[in-house]
């Protein structure tokens, strides 16, 4: 049970690489924060600074009421789940879970109680005598979770814990981790580069780019009101389409654009907001040629090259639509679904 | 695997059998020779079938030695060799595993410099530095002592280098997980790194033990007191010492006995490293 407060954290690696530049973030007690961003944006670095595995170049970090900048990982009352699990290969599952407690001189029966409780919770009680190499990837993942659970720490830190699992197991573990976290109400910091994982698991998600925070907010806030072109492109799949305002004016949609805030020269449109049939509500109308139709089960993606422009756009529709590749189609976008951006700053306008 | 091919496998077996025979034959001759009475060798022909004197010969070398030629009973020499080989093995292993640990897991000034210095000693086996080393050992008063026999041979980098290479393949997250679990550096070393290195330790133990056991030049140089003679020196003295023809039956009995301890070490350690090899994982 603890809050985590980051105040203007910086990390400069030995070679001069600035991996994290000026990150401030307040994490409430029991909150699940997901750090998401492209590869190399500094997610792991930030997490490892919180864990105490990387030194903090500048700024202050508090866990609970304590300033922990100079504390060893073991003294910070955190537990970490690593991407490749980092289980001790020569120890049984039981010993893997118990190791941290033994080092902290817990009494034997307390260790027993906690290990069995965690094993029960994670359904690995049957494997306590096995070595990690005799477990499947999913089971190893659970053991790694178990090692964090038994410690009953103030905060859990996860560094892409699901990225070594296959797609199906990933969804299952995602749900389990989230349920567990909600039940235990332990403050958690979770790193992923998977935007879907971020959206589904987070209380609040933090989008990082180039060592800086692009946006912090609830998943719905971030999805519905991306604060920058970067966030718009990163969160949501398929990615948001970006249309030039000048192009839209040329296609005769000018009257619909008059309501946009000053300075808008880029319009974002989610693939779901491009419609084949014109709605009742005020909307923009566009035409384009179907480049590719991609059925994906319950939904389909249509790649369209807009008329009079080389810009490809992606739309997502339910089921299999009645369109042919190469055919010209009409598209509509409700005015309420436009995301206005200024290309000079890359930020949302208004 | 190469596919199953009758002639191929026949040929492979032939080559292997030939190789084994080549290695085994001298050992066989030594064992046979150690069972014959003294007169057999005068004609200059090595017998190929066992003789009647096995017990007698072994009793002589173990309990009496050849006092006339200045060769003590071999029990003491075996013990000396064993102590020397063990000291060298344990010394080398503990120093090199610790220095490899330091070099891989700690950031300290001139880290790479020290690594290269250690690496350089690879080029300086004892034979190369024998004169200055002798001087140092003599000045320190370590002639005719176990310390003098073993310490100069302990300083070498082979094992450091091998342990370093192994430690670099151990995922760094293991160390980080241990840190989060509250294990300090030495605890990590003891609880995690050592158990993971057990295969390497066993294999190096065997290599080092045989290296120590087979030392010849160095013990010859620094021991003048028969109390510190090693078995390898003893064999040499038996062959050249004395005024008569070498007593081949006794020499061979000694040789056979001298070969036993390394074999026992291999048999014992083999269990460890075969286990390690079959259980290996990351
Ligand atoms: N030990 C290090 N020394 C120097 N630079 C480093 C070190 N570790 C990471 N970096 C650099 O810091 C930046 C951030 O790395 P980090 O590992 O935090 O990225 P990430 O967001 O976790 O990426 P990924 O999704 O690929 O794991 C990268 O540019 C990386 O090259
Ligand atoms: Mg990372």
Image (cartoon, rainbow, N blue to C red):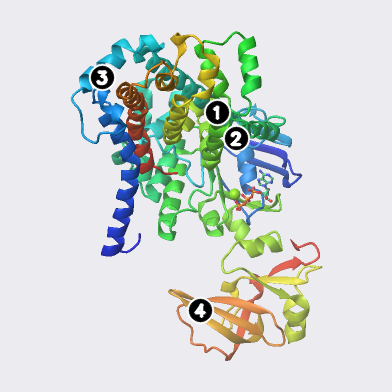
CA distance separating discs 3 and 1: 42 Å
Residue A176 position (above or below residue A279): above
Q: Give yes or no for contact between labels 3 and 4 (Cβ–Cβ under 8 Å).
A: no
The earlier-in-sequence mark between 3 and 2 is 3
Between discs 2 and 1, the one toward the N terminus:
1
Q: Is residue A139 above or below residue A237?
A: above
Tags 4 and 2 in contact by the CB under 8 Å rule? no
Q: Residue furthest front?
A: B43
Q: Which residue is mark 2?
A: B104
The answer to whether residue B150 is seen in the rendering is: no
Determine whether label 3 and label 1 are within 8 Å by CB.
no
Report which residue position mark 4 lands on.
A294
Q: Nearer the viewer, mark 4 or mark 2?
A: 2
Q: Nearer the viewer, mark 3 or mark 1?
A: 3
| Residue drawn at (62%, 10%) of the image | B140
Residue A322 position in % (x across, y down): 48, 87
The answer to whether the beta carbon of the residue marked 3 is less than 8 Å from any atom of ligand 1 is no
Mark 1 or 4: in front is 1
- The residue singled out by tag 1 in the image is B96
Q: Chain of mark 3?
A: B
Q: Nearer the viewer, residue A110 or B149?
A: B149
Circle 3 residue: B57
Residue B52 placement, left or right of A18: left
Q: Earlier in the sequence, mark 3 or mark 1?
A: 3
Q: Nearer the viewer, residue A231 or B230?
A: B230
Between residue A325 and residue A320, name the one nearer to us.
Answer: A325
Image position of A283 (left or right of B202) = right
SS for tag 1?
Answer: helix
Which chain hosts label 4? A
């Amino acid at each position: 049970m603890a809050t985590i407060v980051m105040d203007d954290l910086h990390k400069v690696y030995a070679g001069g690489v600035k991996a994290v530049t000026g990150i401030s973030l307040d994490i409430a007690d029991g909150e699940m924060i997901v750090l998401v961003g492209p590869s190399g944006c500094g997610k792991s670095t930030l997490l490892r600074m919180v864990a105490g595995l990387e030194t903090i170049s500048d700024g202050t970090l508090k866990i609970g009421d304590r300033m922990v900048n100079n504390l060893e990982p073991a003294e910070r009352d955190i537990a970490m789940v690593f991407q490749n699990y980092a289980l001790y290969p020569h120890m049984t599952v039981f010993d893997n879970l118990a190791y941290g407690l033994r080092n902290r001189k817990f009494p034997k029966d307390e260790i027993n109680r906690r290990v069995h409780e965690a094993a029960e919770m994670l359904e690995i009680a049957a494997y306590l005598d096995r070595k990690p190499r005799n477990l499947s990837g999913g089971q190893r993942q659970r053991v790694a979770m178990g090692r964090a659970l038994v410690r009953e720490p103030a905060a859990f830190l996860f560094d892409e814990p699901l990225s070594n699992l296959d797609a199906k197991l990933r969804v299952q573990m995602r749900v389990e981790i989230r349920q567990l976290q909600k039940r235990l109400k332990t403050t958690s910091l979770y790193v992923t580069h998977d935007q879907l994982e971020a959206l589904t698991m987070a209380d609040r998600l933090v989008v990082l780019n180039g060592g800086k925070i692009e946006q912090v907010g609830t998943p719905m806030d971030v999805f519905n009101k991306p604060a920058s072109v970067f966030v718009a492109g990163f969160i949501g799949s398929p990615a948001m389409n970006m249309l030039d305002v000048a192009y839209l004016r040329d296609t005769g949609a000018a009257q619909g654009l008059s309501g946009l805030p000053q300075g808008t020269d880029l319009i974002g449109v989610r693939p779901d907001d491009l419609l084949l049939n014109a709605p009742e509500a005020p909307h923009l109308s566009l035409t384009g040629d179907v480049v590719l139709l991609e059925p994906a089960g319950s939904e389909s993606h249509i790649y369209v090259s807009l008329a009079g422009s080389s810009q490809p756009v992606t739309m997502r529709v339910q089921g299999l639509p009645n369109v042919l590749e190469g055919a010209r189609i009409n598209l509509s976008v409700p005015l309420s679904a436009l995301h206005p951006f200024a290309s000079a700053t890359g930020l949302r306008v208004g | 695997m190469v596919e199953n091919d009758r002639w191929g496998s026949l040929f492979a077996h032939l080559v292997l059998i030939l190789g084994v025979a080549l290695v085994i034959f001298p050992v066989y001759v030594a064992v046979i020779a150690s069972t014959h009475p003294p007169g057999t060798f005068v004609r200059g022909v090595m017998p190929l079938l066992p003789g009647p004197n096995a017990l007698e010969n072994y009793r002589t070398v173990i309990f009496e030695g050849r006092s006339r030629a200045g060769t003590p009973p071999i029990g003491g020499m075996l013990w000396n060799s064993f102590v020397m080989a063990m000291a060298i093995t344990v010394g080398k292993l503990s120093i090199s595993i610790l220095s490899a640990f330091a070099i891989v897991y700690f950031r300290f000034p001139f880290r790479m410099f020290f690594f290269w210095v250690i690496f350089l000693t690879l080029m300086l086996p004892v034979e190369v530095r024998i004169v200055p080393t002798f001087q140092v050992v003599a000045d320190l008063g370590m002639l005719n002592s176990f310390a003098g026999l073993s310490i100069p041979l302990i300083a070498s980098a082979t094992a450091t280098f091998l342990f370093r290479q192994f430690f670099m393949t151990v995922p760094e997250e293991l160390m980080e997980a241990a840190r989060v679990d509250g294990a300090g550096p030495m605890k990590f070393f003891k609880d995690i790194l050592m158990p993971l290195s057990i295969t390497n330790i066993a294999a190096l133990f065997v290599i080092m033990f045989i290296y120590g056991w087979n030392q010849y030049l160095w013990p010859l140089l620094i021991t003048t007191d028969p109390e510190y003679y090693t078995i390898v020196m003893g064999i040499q003295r038996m062959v050249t010492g004395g005024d008569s023809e070498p007593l081949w039956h006794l020499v061979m009995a000694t040789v056979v006995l001298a070969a036993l301890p390394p074999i026992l070490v291999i048999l014992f350690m083999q269990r460890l490293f075969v286990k390690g090899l079959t259980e290996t994982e990351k």
